Amino acid sequence: GKVSEPVRTQYGWHLIKVNRLGKDATPQERNQALQAVYSTNTQAYVQKLMQQAKIDNKLSPPGAQQGLGMRMPQQGR
């Protein structure tokens, strides 16, 4: 039942009220909380990897290369 001091996030200021502790959570609630943490951590990790990645695209745009088993329609026939 305790209320935190104001907490600032990217969405604004918030107050957090603790209704019960993790040890009091049901298995379903515990699983939902873990999934939320995993999702957040995974997104942050992927964003970090993307920022560090060097992408060297050597593929041509679709249709730029002919003769790969697909024929491009010809105009005027």
Image (cartoon, grey):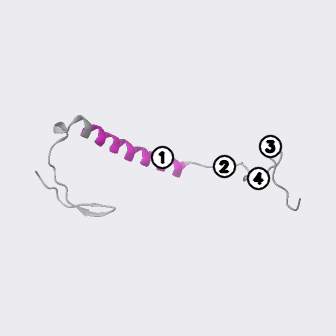
**Relative to the observer, which residue lies in front, 14 or 50?**
14
Q: Under tag 1, what secondary structure? A: helix
Q: Tag 4: residue type? A: Gly
Please give the residue where the numbered disc 1 appears in the rendered image.
46
Which residue sits at x=34%, y=41%?
Answer: 35
Q: Tag 1: residue type? A: Val
CB contact under 8 Å: marks 3 and 2: no
Q: Which SS does the magenta portion mostly show?
A: helix
Q: Name the image quarter holding residue 6.
A: bottom left
Earlier along the polypeptide chain: callout 4 or callout 3?
A: 4
Please give the residue where the numbered disc 4 appears in the rendered image.
63
Q: Give the range drawn in magenta.
A: 30-52
Earlier along the polypeptide chain: callout 1 or callout 3?
A: 1
**Disc 2 versus disc 4: distance between alpha carbons?**
20 Å
**Disc 2 versus disc 1: distance between alpha carbons?**
18 Å
| View extreme (bottom): residue | 12
Earlier along the polypeptide chain: callout 2 or callout 1?
A: 1
Earlier along the polypeptide chain: callout 4 or callout 1?
A: 1
**Disc 4 versus disc 1: distance between alpha carbons?**
31 Å
- Classify 10 Å Cα crowding around label 3: few (below 14), some (14-19), many (20 and above): few
Give above or below for 44 relative to 24. Answer: below
Which residue sits at x=11%, y=52%?
Answer: 2
x and y percentages locating residue 48 in the rendered image: 47, 49
Earlier along the polypeptide chain: callout 3 or callout 2?
A: 2
| View extreme (top): residue | 27
Q: Tag 2: residue type? A: Asp
Q: Under tag 3, what secondary structure? A: loop
Please give the residue where the numbered disc 2 appears in the rendered image.
56
Which residue sits at x=16%, y=56%?
Answer: 4
x and y percentages locating residue 1 in the rendered image: 10, 51
Q: Tag 3: residue type? A: Leu
Q: Is residue 32 magenta?
A: yes
